Amino acid sequence: MTVPETTPPRWITPFLLVASVALCLTTLAALWTGWKKAPDHHGGPVADITVNLGGQPVREHCTSCHVAGGRVSPENPPHPDIAPHSIESLGCTGCHLGEGMALDERISHGLPGFGARQVLKGKDLQGSCFRCHRVSSLPGAEKAWRGYLLFREKACDGCHHIDGLDQGGRFGPDLSALGSKRGLDRIVEAIRDPRKDPPNSIMPRFPLSRGEVTGLAYFLKSRVEDPFHATPMQVRAGQVPLPEIPFPTAPRHKEQGADLLARVRCLACHLFGEEDGRIAPDLSYIGAQRPAEYIETFLENPARLIPGAIMPPLPMKAEERRSLLELLAREAVGPVQTHGVHGTTPEPAKDLYMALCQRCHAAAGDGHGPIAPNLAVFPRPFTGNVDFFRRAPDERLRAGLEKGVSGTSMPPYGNLLSQKEREMVLDLVFAAFVGTTRADKAALEPLPVRPATLPPPNRIAKLFIERCSRCHGRAGTGRGEEAAKHLPRPRNLGNAPYFAARGDDDLARAVADGVPGTAMPAFREILSPGDLWGLVGGVRSMSGTTGEEGGAP
Amino acid sequence: MTRREWLFRGFLTTTLGTAAAAMGGIFLEVWTAAGRFSAAHWSDLAPLGHFRAEGAVPFPSQRVAVVRRSGRLAALSLECTHLGCLVNALDQGFFCPCHGSEFGPLGELYSGPASAPLPWHPVLVRQGRLWVHMGKKLERPDWVTASGQEQEGN
């Protein structure tokens, strides 16, 4: 096959020639204007200094623009007095960071992105003090020192390991060299809004002031791979201990016993009496609510009793744990302290709700309580959830309040509140939030009959992947790819304590008719009775439960 | 062979031999020293009595967990296969605090962003103690029986 020969038009060659010349000229012009405009140091004399930092020769060109270390301006203001330090012996980048050898402003002041070498200036220089000095209450580094105190007081080391602390937690990422990896802005952002990056972060958002966050960030910025006060090996081996500080750092605990709770740093997150960490549930009455064995097991391994709990297992001395348990059994009992508004008609149910329920279920009853984002399981919303409450048998609601909901943060109130008080609170929830009466129940369609033989396990596994895994995840841990879209989040089907307390009928009901108020749809029309009951069995095997121990009536 | 030739040859052999021996010694020293400072060698973890219960015993500072299944032990790496963070050992498996990857009780991948299951390390039992080789990564567990422990227990 031959291609018919065509002659190109005659103008094409000169056109291409002109176009390429124009392109070259535009590129050159753009480069030239950029070059002229950019506040870079081009062509001029390059200042070059070399200093000895921790035994390492460090070469810098900073003084090419920053004459005598001052700011860049026609007046050439000198560098502020930093005695006993001296610029001649320390250079610039030891404290200010940045790339000392670069001559382009964007590079020499630290590239954006993670910004690990981003230049520190002004007050932010405190982020560098503890790179050379050991952590101590150093004059001039007050904010960074306060940051260290906060790091300990707020129990950051309960989750995050830092070299130099022998009791460092291993629950969160290691922060020993954070300063070498992230810029100050990124650290501040990560503390202020942990869920910005990554969105599924389990770190709670601590109620800290702007200044406190900055102090913490100064301290963390000084945790670097190559500090000047010791060799990296010494730091890694834990031979440079961070100073021990007494807890509590401020004598402000009126409550008896709050002292011990502050010392073991429960109050960094939990509420006890008047002291509130605003992260985690109320411990004021935990002694009356939970048996001592439960609390002991929980301290050892929180995720065993509440799978998905973000509380880390805290290393605690045996005697400390014993006195803590004794204290909670002795002090953390009722009666419930309510803060009713005086002078108006007494509303005991409302006061109880505000004292006990509001922290998780919210004052508006929508489940978005102040600590709800930190809980493993989203609190059941009352507002706008009438379908759920019309379907839930009254006995189940009463039992939930009396015995708690195992596998979640809902504690039992049986010992703390009398039956009359519990009924009062339930009535209030229905009247104020649910918007119906407790007697108003929906007529439930009968469940599909469980066939004598269930489909084989491989069919159930395939069905699970097809129908359930997008939300519940392939392994049923409740973290499928669409899980983050839904609140309440898809149930973790591996939550053994939760499923052990639920009967097979409850599970089948949820699969057949869905769960109102959540994203769980009804599968009654889609699945055959065999498949439906097979999936119930699948959930049983994922959670390792049998459904024989409990079961709602 | 003349005397001069013999002397020359002897001198050459001795010099070259000494030089070769010295170089060999230096190479040997470097070779062994390189292994001494890396994790790529057998290291002593804990006595077998440490692993009496079924489940995982994490050693965060060594970045390894020992898993016990029906009387057998194996060592699972605790480094997330996503970006190398240290994963938490929970009853239900392993959870990475950095980006939320989840792994099952035997390191199988449950959910991302990690894209591979946790690797295993070779283990061996020597004088009633468990040793782990951190430098090698295996796809399948290298089980050893915790027999020493059973004998102690009975």
Image (cartoon, helix red, strand yellow):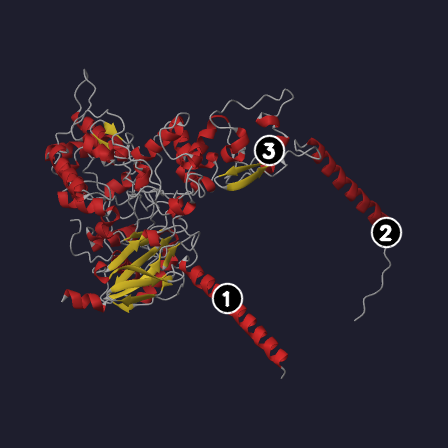
Q: Position of residue A451 (x, y in %)?
A: 24, 64
The answer to whether marks 1 and 3 mark residues whose Cβ atoms lie closer than 8 Å is no
- For disc 1, the neighbor class at 10 Å (few under 14, some 14 to 19, many from 20) is few
- Chain under numbered label 2: A
**Residue B22, label in figure:** 1
Q: Secondary structure at mark 2?
A: helix
The residue under label 3 is A62
Tell me, yes or no, whether the two marked residues, 3 and 2, touch with CB atoms within 8 Å. no
Judged left or right of residue B43, residue A408 is left
Q: Give the amino acid type for the residue marked by disc 2 in the picture.
A: Thr
* Badge 3 and badge 2 both on one subunit: yes
Residue at 40% from the left image edge and 47% from the top image edge? A233
Query: For mark 2, what is the residue?
Result: A13
Q: Residues within 10 Å of mark 2 (few under 14, many from 20)?
A: few
Q: Position of residue A445 (x, y in %)?
A: 25, 51
Q: Can you see residue A45?
A: yes
Mark 1: which amino acid?
Answer: Ala
Q: Position of residue A490 (x, y in %)?
A: 33, 48
In the image, is residue A229 above or below residue A507? above
Question: What's under tag 3, amino acid-wise?
Answer: Cys
